[in-house]
Image: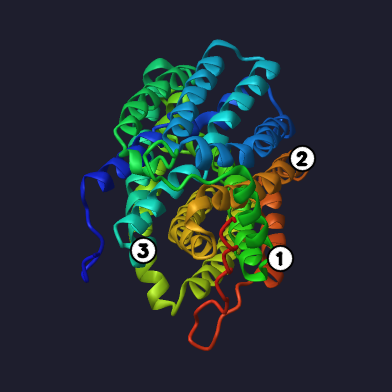
Amino acid sequence: MSSGSGFRRDGQFYRFAAYGFLKNLRFFEPFIILYFREAGFSFLQIGVLYSIREVSTVVLEVPTGFIADIGGRKTSMIMSMAAYITSFTTFFLFRSFESAAGAMVLFAVGEAFRTGTHKAMILEYLRMTDQEEWKPDYYGATRAASMLGSALNALIAAAMVFISGSYRYIFLAAALPCVLNIINLASYPPALDRDGSRKGASRISFRESLHHSMVMLRDASARLSVLNSASFDAFFKVLKEYLQPVLRAAALSVPLLSALADRQRTALLAGGVYFLLFLMASTASRYSGRMSRRASGVGAAMNLTWMAAAATLMVAGISQYRSMFFVTISAYLVLYVLQNLRRPLCVSCISDRVDSRIMSVGLSVESLTKTLLMAVLAPLCGYGADRLGIGPMIALSAIIMAAIYFPLRLRTTGSGRQDVQPTPGPPPPA
């Protein structure tokens, strides 16, 4: 039974936390847009590359979720890490648009095998150990470890760019944490694999998985929860990349750094900002469960963070247009905090409406929806940045985000809790 004072921090909790920490040691992330720009790509081409990645993920998303539920989650996660390693190596060796597109497809293979699967393992573990009441807190704590990894990632990546004067080596270095994560994942208990290899294990068929997914999507509250979560994440993940050119412009405007080369100046500022950003995000993840209780429910907290994010993006866009770079950077810091307060709430909200045996599929449906939206948003935002400038594009995105809040707002009762009924599970197969 779970403790009345909180969830248990046992050995498996620390394995989950280690996974997130290592996964977020992606040293290229603070500089990937600058890497593409240095290679001569326009913002539209960069958007197309992201769209290629997202479309490829769409093709693989739900099938890999089925593979995870039917054939084994640990195997799926290890295949994900192997695909990442191949992608990072391709980025390191080649710099053409075609090779970048191929690397994005390989990255999509890794994303498709990973998204939803590890969250499903966490939620399954909470179900097995009778700790489901602590879902936002538990997932928030593991996500906090991920954000700490991102904070350290920023410092290491900045140091590598500063010393080497190149963005290429950060891709090669990103492969090492994936190797360590393969070792970590292999140590997960067989009970989380759900591969049906144990005697009496509850093995779920492809047909059952599909049936459960259709039941979930026929429920209005489940659909709304998925769309709300996926839409917010799509805007965030596309727009967060535009912080990198803002950081470069800010670094070049600081007189104290004028004695350094452009890349060194950018590396110093980007490393410091991303380190602070992810430390704040880590703290926000820990308080996600507490926020849902103070806001009188998960739905009310998700609604609040949506509108706060739209307002923050408007500030970021206007300040960028007026060359107030450090105001823009501050707005992005707030945006990351809001995202990391919100994400554990989304996972908890969706998991309440999905049968535990097909949790990977349920979360993959949410991820697929987000991916489809990103595939459309990424080139549109890239085109807007090329034509209008980064600032006006961000401000326009904020207006669109505020407009779609109203049809996607989670309904709440007078107590603030989301006004939904759990999706009834299908009858067991004959």
Q: Which mark is residue 336?
A: none
Q: Secondary structure at mark 3?
A: helix
What label sits on residue 132 in the rendered view?
3
Q: Nearer the viewer, mark 1 or mark 3?
A: 3
In the image shown, does 325 or 233 lie closer to the viewer?
A: 233
Given residues 424 and 271, the one toward you in this image is: 424
Q: What separation in Å lies between label 1 and label 2 (alpha carbons)? A: 21 Å
Q: Is residue 233 left or right of residue 407?
A: left
Foreground mark, 3 or 2, reads: 3
Q: Which residue is mark 2?
A: 383
Given the image, on which type of amino acid does mark 3 rest? Glu
405 over 122 or under it: above or below = below
In this orientation, does residue 262 appear?
A: no
Q: Position of residue 88 (x, y in %)?
A: 51, 21
Dot 1 falls on a residue whose secondary structure is helix
At a point 66% along the width and 52% down the height, the residue shown is: 394
Above or below, 56 against 398 in this view is above
Can you say whether 346 is above or below 249 in the image? Answer: below
Of the image marks 1 and 2, the number of the one nearer the N terminus? 2
Task: Identify residue type, mark 1.
Answer: Ile
Quadrant that contains the N terminus? bottom left
Which of the pair 378/248 is nearer the observer?
378
| Left or right: 373 in relation to 27 | right
Q: Earlier in the sequence, mark 3 or mark 2?
A: 3
Quarter placement of the C terminus:
bottom right
The residue to which callout 1 is attached is: 404
